[in-house]
Image (cartoon, grey):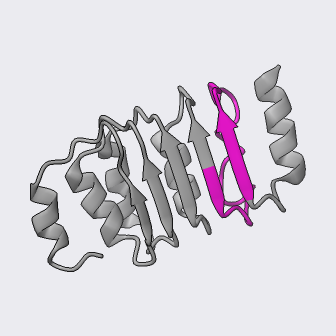
Amino acid sequence: PHSQSLAIILKTVGCVLTRFRLESSSLTGIDDYLTPGNLPALEKVEFLRCDNLTVKIILHLLNAKLKQLTVNPCKISGEGLKELSNCQPLLLEKLHLIYCDEITEHDIINILKMSPNLKDLNLSSGTLITGEMFSELSIGYL
């Protein structure tokens, strides 16, 4: 019932929606609605405790006009995010990946390479980051 209601809402107001926050949801049955074609004006997305968040959903949203993305926590591995290298440069200005234990520093570097407008990056708690990332960052990705 919750998924069906959410799908109806997204289908009805998705064309004008600029912000979307979803908390404690399984995302079952709505991934087809979370696409740039259905949400052309979407600029800010927050997924908080959304168990079934997929790489497919994130990639769809990142290929849109998305400027802000928050995922907390995230069970997505960097393997799926490798597809970002096939995307156009992202419009992201703010990216928060909190408690994303499967995201590595190499995944973050790939995101940074694709995000020339990024101004706010939060990698709190759980990302697999070592000191190696900082030497690559000093080369000029930010």
Along the line of sight, the residue nearer the viewer: 119 or 27? 119
Magenta segment: does it hold 38? yes
Q: Position of residue 18 (x, y in %)?
A: 75, 61
Q: Is residue 112 left or right of residue 19?
A: left
Quarter of the picture holding the C terminus: bottom left
Above or below — where is 93 with respect to 25?
below
80 lies left or right of 22: left
Which residue of the protein is positioned furthest toward the top in this rendering? Answer: 1
Q: For the magenta stretch, what is the residue range?
A: 19-45
Image location of residue 70, percent across then percent down: 53, 49
Q: Height in image: 68 above or below 91?
A: above
**Residue 105: x and y, percent?**
22, 52
In which image quadrant can residue 50 be found? top right
* In the image: residue 2, left or right of residue 138: right
Q: Quadrant of residue 108?
A: bottom left
Which residue is drawn at the image coordinates 38% and 36% (left, top)?
Answer: 99
Residue at image location 21% in from the left, 80% down from the top: 140
Quarter of image, res 121: bottom left
Quadrant that contains the N terminus: top right
Q: Nearer the viewer, residue 23 or 82?
A: 23
SS majority, magenta: loop
Residue 132: % across, % down: 9, 57
Which residue is pictured at 53% across the width and 26% down the height? 51
Residue 100 sits inside the magenta stretch: no
Q: Is residue 34 left or right of residue 85?
A: right
The total of numbered circles placed on residues is 0
